[in-house]
Amino acid sequence: MSAMRQPLFFSFIWLLAGLLLVLPLPSAAVAAASPSLSSEDLSDIARIEDYLNATSTMQARFIQMDSTGETSEGDFMLWRPGRLRIAYDPPSPVVITANGLFLVFEDTELEQLTHIPLMSTPAGVLVEEEIRLNSEDLEVTGIRRGANTLDVSIIQRDDPYAGRITLVFTDRPLQLQRWIVLDAQGVTTNFALTGTQTGMSFDPELFKTKKNDLRRDR
């Protein structure tokens, strides 16, 4: 994969998971915060899970920003279970799709494909058939409530030092608004949605790579 593409690709792999509303923390501090959840917290987690599980399709524009100063825009599509599409605006040649098994990074300019098992990435959280935020694999580390906002922060139980993810919603009614990711290196990535729509139909071809003969990075 081209070195110029790597920051965009790997920031995307992490951004599909959360929002951090505090200053960046060292990775050890990410794992340290694991407060007990109140009955109100558990109720809000259940509401969020119900909302996400009831959302079969979603489409929006996005603005991706990270703490290194890089900014990108494009189109986001989600078709649960298993499928998503991130198409960056020109001049970026990057299209990222999920087809149920793999997260596929396609560089149409270099004619390269990179495949990553979908469930080994944070993207798996959004496209699972049944989304559970507090489970054997994931741990909710906190809930934050603001003026018409509700945020849930999550870590991976088997690798708590890998980073922290927080999904951010507008509240009553719930709607996914954005996510920012804090990775193990202290880099944050903010992925904000605008013009969000749900309940539409998609052409399945949108979630496939355009060329079957593109060569893969190994």
Image (spheres, grey):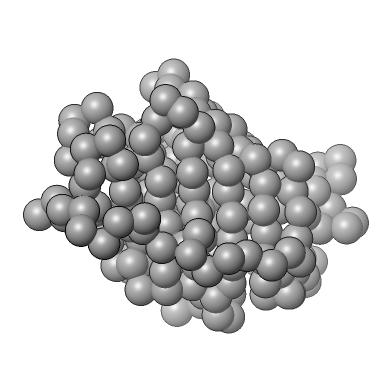
Answer yes or no: is residue 165 visible. no
How many numbered dots are placed on residues in this image?
0
Pick out the residue farthest to the top.
Answer: 69
Where in the figure is residue 19, as x and y percent of width and height? 57, 44
Lateral position of residue 146 relative to residue 122, left or right: right
Residue closer to the observer: 137 or 96: 96
Q: Where on the picture, by quarter, is residue 158?
A: bottom left
Q: Where on the picture, by quarter, is residue 39?
A: bottom right
Residue closer to the observer: 165 or 68: 68
Residue drawn where x is 36% and y is 35% of the image: 93
Q: Name above or below for residue 30 compared with residue 118.
A: above
Answer yes or no: is residue 170 visible. yes
Residue closer to the observer: 122 or 136: 122
Pick out the residue farthest to the left.
Answer: 218
Q: Name above or below for residue 208 compared with residue 134.
A: above
Residue closer to the observer: 149 or 89: 89
Where in the figure is residue 26, as x and y percent of width and height? 37, 36
Residue drawn where x is 65% and y is 40% of the image: 61
Lateral position of residue 86 relative to residue 11, left or right: right
> Which quadrant of the rendered structure holds the N terminus?
top left
Q: Name above or below for residue 27 compared with residue 156.
A: above
Q: Name above or below for residue 73 compared with residue 193.
A: above
> Which quadrant of the rendered structure holds the C terminus?
bottom left
Lateral position of residue 34 relative to residue 59, left or right: left
Residue drawn where x is 45% and y is 79% of the image: 136
Pick out the residue farthest to the right.
Answer: 172
Residue drawn where x is 76% and y is 54% of the image: 197
